Image (cartoon, coloured by chain):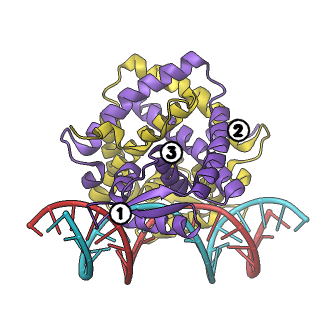
Chain colours: A purple, B yellow, C cyan, D red
Amino acid sequence: MTSTTLTNIDLESRVHAAHPDQLRLWLRLLTCTQLIEKRVRLGLRLEFDTTLPRFDLMAQLEKSPSGLKMVDLSKRLMVSGGNITAITDQLVSEGWVQRVDVEGDRRSWKIQLTKAGKTYFNQMAKAHEIWILESFEGLSKKEIQTLHKLLAQVKHTALQQLIGPDTSTLTEAL
Amino acid sequence: MTSTTLTNIDLESRVHAAHPDQLRLWLRLLTCTQLIEKRVRLGLRLEFDTTLPRFDLMAQLEKSPSGLKMVDLSKRLMVSGGNITAITDQLVSEGWVQRVDVEGDRRSWKIQLTKAGKTYFNQMAKAHEIWILESFEGLSKKEIQTLHKLLAQVKHTALQQLIGPDTSTLTEAL
DNA sequence: TATTGTTATACTCTATAACTATA
DNA sequence: TATAGTTATAGAGTATAACAATA
């Protein structure tokens, strides 16, 4: 018989019997996220010739039709301003987003999806939704709700741990 | 009042009310993982001047005291062979791991932690464990078990979706 | 022929810091 | 002074492909 089964060939093989349940949970959480993320990245690259950060930025814009400032995008995507400039430049050159003047503050832009960008994003979002549905198809509706609820608590705690109990922004904390 | 609360300034603001529960679950899963991962990366950088991929590679070696071949590391860490060579080279130059000849196959090495590497890794692992315990301290023991169990199903399904039902390795599928 | 590992290359994402323009 | 955004730079990680050595 072979020395390792497929399910052992991943990060979880790191866990020792002596390690606490929290560590096992973290590695399982990480494995799940990485598997789904790899699937999404693969699909975005093969079917749409794009990347996850670009998709994420467009998803933020789709959610805010009036547009978002660079600094808003920086906070929401939890990356530095220079990154936002770089990714935005790419998307502008490809025609998917546009910079629009902000009335009353000549330092800022509103970044918006173009009409072509909306169409393009909607196509990606449909495919994305299918990949995600497939990734969770082993769970019942109730299990999905339970998971969602438990992860709410994790999110709350992890956020506190990362940024502390004050009101500073995420990017400032990093 | 401010337009956004802190908990809205993240990826989950992408979700629309019309989107299915699975999509909400995925974004929450991603947010949780990213928050904890940022905390771990920050700690590894500030306290140990190292990175997560390097830590992960050493963790694999610590789990396999007899050593692992490059190809094993490639599969377990789900990255290409060239990356393993690069990261291993760094760790060798820093004295934390060593390449050891494999009897009977002159193409391969066994990569092992050095004595100094074991000491160094154990220090990191202690700190890592604390960061993880803190990240999940909002959950009861039972909730941790429930989460772990539900994520087992997610892992299984996501793995099938990513690589298909056959027996090929992860890296081959990517 | 297939496998193991290395090398060369290029690309994406990332942060930091210096800078300009504006508030 | 502080904020918004850009630019320049450097570094890490990643994949791919060509390659050499060995099985």
| D5 left or right of B170 in image | left
A113 or A44, nearer to the observer: A113
Residue B95 position in % (x across, y down):
41, 67
Q: CA distance from mark 1 to mark 2?
A: 35 Å
| B49 left or right of A41 in image | left
On whether disc 2 and disc 3 are found on a single subunit, the reply is yes
Residue A174 position in % (x across, y down):
29, 55
Residue B99 position in % (x across, y down):
55, 65
Q: Residues within 10 Å of mark 2 (few under 14, many from 20)?
A: some
Report helix, strand or loop for mark 3: helix
Say which residue appears at 68% left-offset and 48% top-offset: B170
| A69 left or right of C12 in image | left
The residue where tag 3 is placed is B63
| Position above or below: B136 against B128 | above
Disc nearest the viewer among 3 and 1: 1
B139 or A108, nearer to the observer: A108
Quadrant where the image shows the N terminus of chain A? top right
Q: Is residue B97 visible?
A: no
Q: CA distance from mark 3 to mark 1?
A: 39 Å
Q: Residues within 10 Å of mark 1 (few under 14, many from 20)?
A: some
The residue where tag 2 is placed is B161
Report helix, strand or loop for mark 1: helix
- Residue at the extreme front of the image, as rendered: A103
Residue type, label 2: Gln
On whether disc 1 and disc 2 are found on a single subunit, the reply is no
The residue where tag 1 is placed is A81
Callouts 1 and 2 close, C-beta under 8 Å: no
Disc nearest the viewer among 2 and 3: 2
